Amino acid sequence: MSAWFAAAIVGLGTYLTRASFLVTLADRDLPPVMIHAMRNVAPAVLAALVASILVGERGVAGLAQPVELVALSVALVVAARTRNLTATLATGMAAFWIARWFAG
Amino acid sequence: MTWSEAGIDSAYRAAVREGWPLLIPALPFALVLGVAISDGTFGVLVGWSTSWIVFAGAAQLALVTLFVEVGPVSAIVSALVVNARHLMYSAALAPAFRQQPPWFRYLAPYVLIDQIFAVTITKLDADPTYFRRYYVMLGSVFWVSWQVTVGAGVLLGNGVPAEWGLGFAVPVLFIGLTVLSVVRRPALMAAAVGFVVAVVAAPLPNRSGLLVGAIAGVVAGAAIDRDPV
């Protein structure tokens, strides 16, 4: 599949999601069950993305990356404390470089 | 100065004044995205073009980093699912669009990102003309800044040696986005289960572990959700 085609699908899907209520002006609210499920979708997908990027196809064995784990743990704590993406990015990368230097 | 000129001026000024505190924190995200694009696995031109084709940071980042590594289908599904929250934004903002002209109702969704929702949801009671000018100004500022900064990130990525490991900013950013998306206990459960199951299921064929983890997370979150439906 070409990257352009994939970008077009995601672009169209994203637009339709955003346009749904604004264009149709639907007076109805979303079904409560859907709202309920949706509030858990982003955290579940984003966490699964982190896992996938971190371990690749190796599964649990892929967790044996002390430098990456330390850096991501620091990022996790900073994000939870500050809820600030820029601070998370800065400290996570700093932790990554420092841990890597210690690991040689 | 006539009243309407004063109105235009204040809507545009207010959009800039109230938008920039949210714009500045979005710029490092755009840089990370640009750096991720610069590695070339997705294609540099098409990668940067997702900024105007999709215009949604987390979805763009998922698409360009997963497309080759994990596969096109998982990448597309992940990007679209990450964006499902926009359905809620659309529903919540709809009242402000009932008196708007069609061109605006079709154009506005294109720039309906998290930050624009966060600011304009506080303007539901504004005069329709004021609301439209405010929204258009805010959307334009974010859109232009995003295109330019993602491009700057591509140049930055090309200029910085690979040994620096700037690519690691991608999982760091996703960790941050995960934490920010957790505002309730069921969401915490969803994230924790999503992560653990995605790790355990990672060796599954076609890299389906990502989606298996995501589904398990959603189900786990719903299972402990005691809020009234």
Image (tube, rainbow, N blue to C red):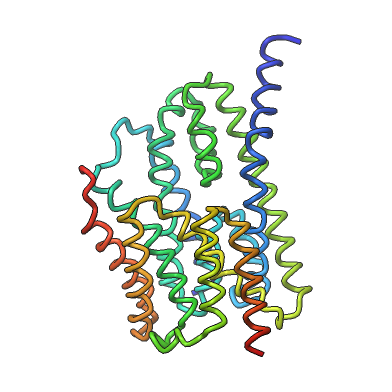
- On the image, the x and y values in percent for residue B195 come to 38, 71
- On the image, the x and y values in percent for residue A5 come to 51, 66
In this view, B151 is above or below B8: below
Q: Quadrant of residue B164?
A: bottom right
User: In the rendered view, does B160 fall on the left or right side of B229?
Assistant: right
User: In the rendered view, does B17 fall on the left or right side of B61?
Assistant: right
Q: Which residue is at the front of the view, B148 or A78?
A: A78
Quadrant containing the C terminus of chain B is top left
- On the image, the x and y values in percent for residue A101 come to 68, 84
In this view, B114 is above or below B177: above
Q: Which residue is at the front of the view, A51 or B55?
A: A51
Quadrant containing the N terminus of chain B is top right
The residue depicted at 29 percent of the width and 61 percent of the height is B218
The extreme top residue here reads B2
The residue depicted at 67 percent of the width and 69 percent of the height is B35
The residue depicted at 39 percent of the width and 85 percent of the height is A59
In this view, B206 is above or below B169: below
